[in-house]
Image (cartoon, rainbow, N blue to C red):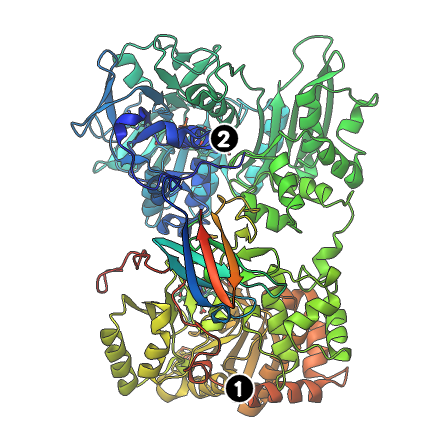
Amino acid sequence: MSTDAQPAVEARLGPVDQIPLGEGRAFLVGDEPVAVFRPRSGGLHALRAICPHRGGPLADGLVDGEVVMCPLHNHQFSLADGTCATGADDVTAYAATEEDGELVVRLH
Amino acid sequence: MTQTATRPETPDAASTKSRLVVVGNGMSGARALEEILARGGGEQFAVTVFGDEPYGNYNRILLSEVLAGAAGEAVDNEDSDDLYLNPLDWYDENGITLHAGVRIVRIDRHAKVVLGDDGSVTPYDVLVLATGSRSFFPPMEGMWASDTELTPGVFGFRSLDDAQAMLAHVEQHRTAVVIGGGLLGLEAAAGLQAHGVAVHVVHPTEVLMNQQLEAEASKVLRSKLEQMGMHLHLGVKTNEILTADGRVSGVRFTDGSDLACDMVVVTAGIRPNIGLAMVSGLETQRAIVVDDKMRSVDDDAIFVVGECAQHRGEVYGVVGPLWEQAAVLADVVTGADPDAEYHGSRLATKLKVAGVDVAQMGVKAPERASDEFVQFSETGRGVYQTVVIRDGTLIGATLVGDVSKVAALTQAFDSRSALPEERVKLLFDLGSAGDASAAADLPDDTQICNCNGVSKGDLVACVEHGAESVSACMAQTRAGKGCGSCKGLVKEVVEAALGGAGVEDPADSYYVPGIPLDKPTLMREIRTRELKSVSSVFAALAPEGKEHVGSKMGLTALLRMMWPDDVVDERDGRFINDRVHANIQRDGTFSVVPRMSGGVTDAAQLRRIADVAEKHDIPMIKLTGGQRIDLLGVPKEKLPEVWADLDMPSGWAYGKSFRTVKTCVGTDFCRFGLGDSTRLGIDLEERYKGIEGPAKMKLAVSGCPRNCAESMVKDVGLVAVEGGKWQIYVGGAAGATIRQGDVLATVDTHEEAMTITGRFLQYYRENANWLERTYDFVPRMGLDHIIAVVVDDTEGIAAELDARMQASVDRYVDPWAADQTEATPGQFHDALPLVPLPQVPVREGSSR
Ligand code: SRM
Ligand SMILES: Cc1cc2nc3c(=O)[nH]c(=O)nc-3n(C[C@H](O)[C@H](O)[C@H](O)COP(=O)(O)OP(=O)(O)OC[C@H]3O[C@@H](n4cnc5c(N)ncnc54)[C@H](O)[C@@H]3O)c2cc1C
Ligand code: SF4
Ligand code: FES
């Protein structure tokens, strides 16, 4: 991403519980489609919403505490840093946090 | 070699990058590009590729399979992971300009431009020639219809177009002559035989595949091929192709005898495509002469890779060496390692020739009096193995029919390592444990899968990242998905990496990979601990209580079967299809298939479907193979509306569940009908609709043994027979696997047919492994055992099975009706916001 020059984008996306526990939902942050996941084991994670393999919707994937599995061809991406353990390209990871019950995503 | 290069987000001003042009979009051209991209070349170069075949880049090795028909589907489907190495969108994604179907006719080296046959003039800073080879057609009367066209019925075997032309031809033609009994010829012959064509292979010497094999090895191969019904004409030459009405009618041999045929395949060798280099003033001999940096010896801006390159006098014709060349080329071109050099490849080939395994490395036979030669042949089994040893190192090996020792031998050959004193141990006595350790000892950079360029290190990394089975590793790396000849070796490497020195992998028996229990034990634990949610199963039974993504679907299905009344519905345990009750498609939209029990519909229903399709601009309406209607391309957020407008029940085309019952018209209309197949089909579908299980359940009912509903190849298939009886077949399949169902029972009444079907399905639900279809389940359990339990009730559980099935039937709710309002927040929210839809090509009207 060549967004270095721009200031970091930060978005407040509303209540955290719009993401059901253990699932992911997609949001648009600036121009960037971002999938935010809320694993049962805790925490929030944000990845670019589009699978680098063939463009699958990562927010529709199954997740556990560590990875999301793309629903199209089952490539798995680390929730923490977007690295792919199954041979596809890595996906960009973003920061997602909860602030006063609200979901906040930062692109850097 | 992970690709870390980020994609260009916007097309940069071309002027800032230097221009890389690749001529030839075959296996080595594309491989060189991949290697260049992996070294960050995407940032450095504006890349343009010319290929005179009108496709993305495909795996030429698989053409044998395409011809044999096994990969027929792969050809139609541009998304195929199998045939296409890089489909067209790969080029887009990587910012590469591809001119498919354009041939480069000249290089102007002074102006540094390439000229295309479409009149285009394209400048380059760096040029890569990867023009490969073409079929060689020996001069022969009758070969050509004109200067450029072969006589109709004569084929080469090099390109996808060749394979498809042959496929079209074999539909009406019965006898083929293959000229040339090398690897390609035998592959072509086997492919044609698979279509029921009588095949004659004509080869000028007594030794088939003489490039790879010596006489004895070839003899073994020969007898195997003859057993397969191939006609071999060895030591004869073809003189002329005979024609009638301008088409092939036979061939004439040098001894004057004729052989009638309606098709000729010429596989008499290949010739590197060097015309372009010649007219452009580059040094060519057998191929384009390159230095150790894979550069033309005449021009520092021109690199050459693949079958069109001649390096230190060698021209290679298999992909292994090409991969090595591509890596060196990329190192030099990108500057990642400007000193990289290619020093030639030692050839070790693993092939499957017409279904026979062949591995060959180094020399074929002893060359000096002092060379040791170990030879083993077991003609009955069609096995022949030799090794050649010089000064204590392995310099050659040939294996035909049994290549189980190839791992150990390749290692000894590559590393020139010490050999066992008793040479025969090279071929025997390594046992399975020895094999696994041999695989474990292979250096990490040993290439295991040549088709897809997968090294041992790649496979081991896969295991280290959590892959738990051979098939998972194969899926992730694509190893073994080319010609398939390396599957055995892949298995050895993966098993060794999984820690089993030949040990059975216990994980194979787990119901799901994340919980180390087989299905009966898992069910017992779930029942005694009353675990009713996926998260509670993980917490109680998974190592460290950790969730495992690949196990969630299987557990959800199991719990829904075990606790029909009070399963805790955790939506995150479901696959997306089961969260939104539709089938996800490649662009993130969904397909909607309403239930039409027994494939019977009426005018009102059809009208409603038509109205819905029109109202929602459904991109494609299709009749499915399951006798119903599919509305494809529905965006997720529109699903509830589409269901509401349809006002029909779900057809469950998305779940691991009871799908359809195909029927024929039966007694109501058909003059042969013996039983009311339509009625029984509808009743079965109404009763068992949507019942979930370990995998899909597809049924059919036919009204007589003519079997128009294809009952013999269904999970459960029923056929009406004389006397008002129904024959019940189970374990049939005609999808990825073809299996004829076994007769479970012949029953007298409609009611019994319903009950036995339900009881079998319940037994299957409770005992099959996750994703195990009945075609694997029935043979695994044994038909006799299933008959004993399900029909004869020897275990006394029939009543319980029936009761548990009844409970599932009673609890059934239609998911479309139930989920009209969101079950979870954002259940139907688009998961790809603002991404233009659809990315799936939309077909017009009924044109295919
Ligand atoms: C729509 C349909 C093709 C069509 O246009 O006719 C179809 C479409 C799909 N089939 Fe099929 N199959 C369809 C009939 C069949 C049939 C024929 C039949 O049912 O009579 C078979 C062979 C019988 C069988 O099931 O074995 C069939 C064997 C498969 C297989 C191979 C299963 C196997 O183990 O052999 C798969 C892959 C899988 O299940 O993993 C598959 C998977 C698929 C999936 C679901 C791929 C996927 O996972 O996304 C396709 C969904 C496309 C989509 O986007 O909606 N489909 N598929 C047919 C739907 C029938 C229906 O009304 O429900
Ligand atoms: C049926 C079959 C089975 C095989 N099985 C095996 C196997 O089991 N194992 C193995 O290792 N190898 C096998 N091979 C060989 C392997 O496919 C080749 O070694 C490999 O494809 C060579 O790659 P290449 O890029 O050099 O040439 P190619 O793959 O032939 O690519 C060259 C491309 O350049 C294009 N081109 C040529 N001239 C121009 C021009 N002037 N302008 C634009 N484009 C041009 C051609 O159309 C072609 O698409 C098999 C080959 C065939 C045909
Ligand atoms: S299966 Fe029998 S009853 Fe059904 S259509 Fe065929 S011939 Fe007629
Ligand atoms: S698109 Fe995500 S795995 Fe293929």
Name the residue located 67 percent from the left edge and 27 percent from the top edge: B410
Would you call the spot at circle 1 few (<14 residues within 10 Å), some (14-19), or many (20 or more)? some
Tell me: residue B226, above or below residue A71: above
Report which quarter residue B386 is drawn in: top right
Q: Position of residue B54 (x, y in %)?
A: 28, 38
Quadrant including the C terminus of chain B:
bottom left
Quarter of the render that holds ligand 2: top left
Of the image marks 2 and 1, the number of the one nearer the N terminus: 2
Mark 2 lies within 8 Å of ligand 2 (Cβ measured): yes
- Residue type at tag 1: Tyr
Q: What element carries label 1?
A: loop
Q: Mark 2 lies on which chain?
A: B
- The quarter in which the N terminus of chain B is drawn is top right
User: Tag 2: residue type?
Assistant: Leu
Q: Is mark 2 on a helix, strand or loop?
A: helix
**Can I make out residue B710 in this image?**
no
Q: Is residue B467 above or below residue B115?
A: below
Q: Which residue is drawn at 76% across and 82% down?
A: B794
Residue B552 in the figure: left or right of residue B258: right
The x and y percentages for residue A60 are 47, 63
* Quarter location, residue B778: bottom right
Q: Position of residue B635 (x, y in %)?
A: 34, 67
The residue to which callout 1 is attached is B812
Instruction: State whether residue B355 is above or below residue B397.
Output: below
Residue B436 seen by the camera: yes
Left or right: B191 in relation to A86: left
The residue tagged 2 is: B183
Where residue B254 is drawn, which disc sits there?
Answer: none
Give whichever of B563, B710 is nearer the camera.
B563
